[in-house]
Amino acid sequence: MGDKKFAIIATKGTLDWAYPPFILGSTAAALGYQVGIFFTFYGLNLLKKKLDLKVTSLGNPAMPMPMPVPVMAQILPGMQAMMTSMMKAKMKAKGVASIEELRELCIEAQVRMIACQMTVDLFEYSTSEFIDGIEYGGAATFLEFAGDADITMYM
């Protein structure tokens, strides 16, 4: 691995927020960076074996939709599932890799993926729920890596 370090903090667990840490992490690793991603709070969902990520446009007015959907309509039952389905179909049609594929690229590229132990304990997760090849640690574990990172991003 190279001398440059890239540290990412992943805090979101939705489909749309799953892409940035894995795309940036795998790309940086391919460019020779040492990459560490710290998954905390809802970001832990990205490390689960069984991914059931959803997207919502609530709170995200910039989300491009094929047709404008009024905010009030977005709270109706089934809208989140419909929007998630539409987003997945669009990504597939455009040849965008799945989260599982991007995550596997990160593993193959030796991206260090750290699950926040405090959050695992807080939400009473079992380590058996998470993929193999990750490590568990707290803020101090991540800060050892991030303390001298060339680039640090919070997502």
Image: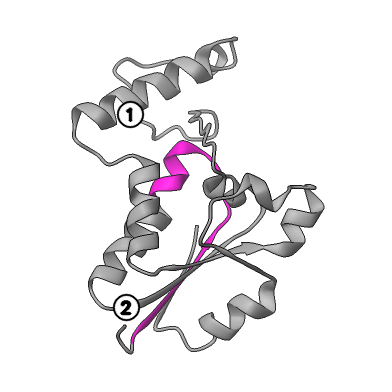
Residue 130 is situated, as x and y percent measured from the top left of the image, at 60, 49
Residue receiving disc 2: 33
Q: Secondary structure at mark 2?
A: loop
The correct choice, above or below, for 142 with respect to 50 in the image is: below
- Judged left or right of residue 142, residue 17 is left
- The tag earlier along the polypeptide, 2 or 1, is 2
Q: What's the magenta region? A: 4-19
Q: Is residue 144 visible?
A: yes
Q: Does 15 appear in magenta?
A: yes
Residue found 33% across the figure and 39% down from its top: 98
Q: Is residue 70 visible?
A: no
Residue found 32% across the figure and 56% down from its top: 105
Q: Residues within 10 Å of mark 2 (few under 14, many from 20)?
A: many
Residue 124 is situated, as x and y percent measured from the top left of the image, at 80, 47
Residue found 50% across the figure and 28% down from its top: 56
Residue receiving disc 1: 64
Residue 135 falls in image quadrant: bottom right
Residue type, mark 1 in image:
Pro
Residue 128 is situated, as x and y percent measured from the top left of the image, at 66, 48
Residue closest to the far left: 94
- Of the 4 image quadrants, the one containing the N terminus is bottom left
Residue 26 falls in image quadrant: bottom left
